[in-house]
Amino acid sequence: MTCRILFVEDELAIREMVEMALTRAGYHVTGAQDSRAAMTCIADQYPDLILLDWMLPDSSGLELARRIRKDKQTQRIPIIMLTARNTEADMIQGLDSGADDYITKPFSPRELVARIKALLRRSAPHGVDELIEHHGLKLNTGSQRITIGSTEIKVGPTEYRLMLFFMTHLDRVYTRAQLLDHVWGQTTYVEERTVDVHIRRLRKALEPFGLAGFIETVRGSGYRYHPKASSPLM
Ligand code: CA
């Protein structure tokens, strides 16, 4: 099946260049020139991935990313943020808004396609319908939902993949590089710092349930998923 990508960008020249590169790579691309047009496109047909420019004429790409993440219908759509802003603070702000990846302009079409492929791969359903369960937490690989009791713990696609990895690899310490390999897949483009951002997001999602402590930072090494023996909030 052809993947549908929504590209939100107000600069026509960039939109045409990217649309051409992605069409050549076999994707079906829809362009939107601002947030309002993007929301119309999303309501019309959910894209498999959204490429989102930070600077848009009506509202910023950050706001749009937050809106997409807040809505239950759209929260699982993978988002790549595109921007000319290239400091680490910008990157973290971009990822904190709910984006799964971050590419700085100017970028090569080849790099963009590689990032899209990697993100689609890690957002893809697991295939087998499986229920992983411990300490009251349930992760369903078919529906890609994480629940505790009857409440869903809302996470984005990258946090879901992290959680899936953690729940199937308990009590072991993984370095950021190992987590990148296992969760993000072999890609040379993602910085190790990205792992910290997604860990923070995952902890934030777990916090209301008293489970943030399940993810331990091991100083100088990395992270360990270590569910405590005591029962979480039920
Ligand atoms: Ca722009």
Image (spheres, rainbow, N blue to C red):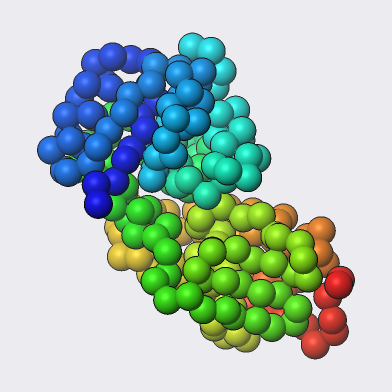
Residue 168 is situated, as x and y percent measured from the top left of the image, at 54, 82
Report the residue that reaches farthest toward the top.
57
The answer to whether residue 91 is above or below residue 117 is: above
Query: On the picture, is 48 further left or further right than 152?
Result: left
Q: Quadrant of the C terminus?
A: bottom right
- Residue 176 visible in the current orientation: no
Query: On the picture, is 216 further left or further right than 27?
Result: right
Q: Splitting the image into 4 quarters, where does residue 112 fall?
A: top left
Residue 70 is situated, as x and y percent measured from the top left of the image, at 65, 40
Residue nearest the viewer, comparing 219 with 57: 57
Residue nearest the viewer, comparing 194 with 146: 146
Report the residue that reaches farthest toward the front.
44
Q: Residue at x 33, y 15 (%)?
A: 11
- Residue 11 visible in the current orientation: yes
The answer to whether residue 83 is above or below residue 146 is: above
Q: Residue at x 21, y 37 (%)?
A: 22
Q: Residue at x 23, y 41 (%)?
A: 27
Residue 63 is situated, as x and y percent measured from the top left of the image, at 60, 28
Residue 104 is situated, as x and y percent measured from the top left of the image, at 37, 34
Query: On the picture, is 154 further left or further right than 60?
Result: right
The answer to whether residue 167 is above or below residue 5 is: below
